Image (cartoon, grey):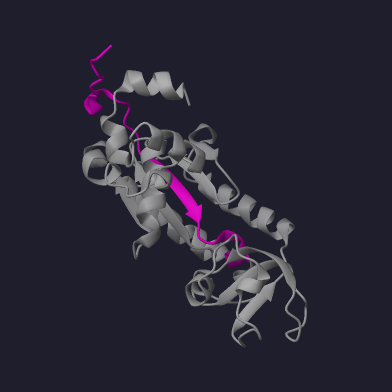
Amino acid sequence: MNSNLKFDYDKEPSRDILCLDCKSFYASCEAVALGYDPLKVKLVVMSYPSGSPQKRGSGLILASSPQAKKAYNISNVSRARDLPYPYPDDLVIVAPRMNLYMEVNKTINNIYRTFVSDEDIAVYSVDETFLDVTNSLSYFDCETAYDLAKIIQTKVFRETGIYTTVGIGDNPLLAKLALDNESKFNPDMKAEWRYKDVKTKLWSIPKLTDFWGIGSKTEIRLNKLGIKSIYDLSQYNYYELKDNMGVM
């Protein structure tokens, strides 16, 4: 079959979906518990800290605050040896406390539940949750999902000290892509991607692996088909793609 599918977004389901992410969650939980501002402190959660500034310690860096990542060029897959040594005086190193993180996660998701019914919340991971706020806007006297997202962010911060980033979209995919590719870099930590933004925002995602669900192995398979970008993927023949990749 040579013809390709044509999508009419006017006929697609359109909801007000929020994808909320707790910023640098483990590190933020530790920062708040220790009395620091999560966005200002240089803090890492290390699997085997030494407990002494005279010893380097070992193990994985499980989480880093935004300032620690910026200062030391580290990620959440770094190791103790990637930190400068002797450790800087303003660097806070802590051991992981999973019970603490689970308790804060429970508290935050209970806050989310004050804005939506049980069927409109989906916990995706320890730090990410989807909310369908379509039916909640009028109840909270909000004209837009963006307005309600701001209210939710404020309530979570006031009650837990945790900052949240929010992606907003017509469906969970667009909300997640808005979160991953824009909101985390915006000053107000929010971004909105609607069907009307697909060509300008979604198609312009620079790397295939920046698209939710496309990992390095899938990227290699797509590259072999001549697909190097999200735009290439959007223009590729649907039927040929399904024949080569199957249903994912």
Instruction: Tell me which corner region of the image, top left, top right, bottom left or bottom right, holds residue 29.
Output: bottom right
172 magenta-colored: no
Judge whether 62 appears above or below 55 on screen: above
Residues 243 and 75: in front is: 243
105 left or right of 4 in image: right
Q: Residue at x 37, y 56 (%)?
A: 183
Judge whether 228 appears above or below 27 on screen: above
Quadrant for the N terminus, please: top left
Q: Residue at x 61, y 86 (%)?
A: 88
159 left or right of 143 in image: right
| Residue extent of the magenta highlight | 1-29
5 left or right of 240 in image: left
Q: Residue at x 24, y 14 (%)?
A: 2
User: At which x and y percent is residue 217?
Assistant: 51, 39
Q: Is residue 135 visible?
A: no
Instruction: Tell me which corner region of the image, top left, top right, bottom left or bottom right, holds residue 211.
Output: top left
Q: Residue furthest top?
A: 1
Residues 212 and 234: in front is: 234
148 left or right of 25 in image: left
Judge whether 112 appears above or below 186 on screen: above
Instruction: Tell me which corner region of the image, top left, top right, bottom left or bottom right, holds residue 3.
Output: top left
User: At which x and y percent is residue 37?
Assistant: 53, 75
User: At which x and y percent is residue 218?
Assistant: 47, 36
User: At which x and y percent is residue 33?
Assistant: 65, 70
3 magenta-colored: yes
* Labels in figure, total: 0
